[in-house]
Amino acid sequence: MTKIFATFLLFTFAVVSGCVGGKTAASSADFWVKKSEKQLGEGVECLFNTDKSYVLCRKVVENAGLPQGVDFVVYAVSKQKAVYSEKLKVGAVEWLDDKHVYIINQAKGQQAEAVSDVNASRVVIEVATGKKVDTTKTGEKK
């Protein structure tokens, strides 16, 4: 009986030790950098939303004579799966809130001095669906 009790305690300790304080690979920014570099190349920066349910990985792309562009992918952390990606020749992307990314995209053929140029289109994407949303409901940045 003592052996069974000791085995039970050892097993319980092992299970509790594995669950407490350990980071899962998916909660590590390094994990997502390595994963996204396969798609975007080196020089990736990954940013979690505030509840860490999604991660935005982006790579700034230098364009000769133009403002910077950005290639990016958004992953669902729990599924470890890409849910949205895009390559912008001249543009920027950032989190608007936990469920939306804010994209600034310079129209093709227009000259721009900066990514925030007034001629650029501004789009909000709901990351769960990959669809554009009505920006009056999301509090789009002006």
Image (cartoon, rainbow, N blue to C red):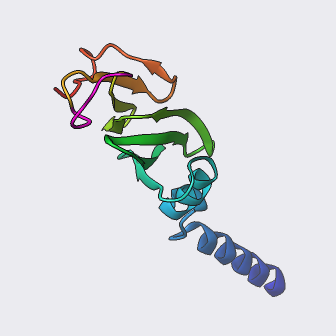
Q: Position of residue 32 (x, y in %)?
A: 55, 55
Quadrant of the image containing the N terminus: bottom right
Quadrant of the image containing the C terminus: top left
> Which residue is drawn at the image coordinates 54% and 69% (left, top)?
20
Residue 116 left/right relative to 42: left
> Which residue is drawn at the image coordinates 52% and 64% (left, top)?
30
Q: Is residue 139 above or below residue 8?
A: above
The residue sitting at the front extreme is 65
Toward which corner of the image does residue 35 lie, by quadrant?
Answer: bottom right
> Which residue is drawn at the image coordinates 28% and 17% (left, top)?
135
107 and 25: which one is in front? 107
Q: Position of residue 77 (x, y in %)?
A: 55, 46
Q: Is residue 29 above or below residue 136?
A: below
123 in the magenta segment: no
110 in the magenta segment: yes
Residue 50 left/right relative to 20: left
Toward which corner of the image does residue 79 lie, by quadrant?
Answer: top right
Q: Is residue 72 above or below residue 118?
A: below
Please identify the dominant SS of the magenta region: loop
> Which residue is drawn at the image coordinates 75% and 84% (left, top)?
6
Q: Position of residue 94 (x, y in %)?
A: 33, 40
Q: Which residues are magenta?
A: 108-116
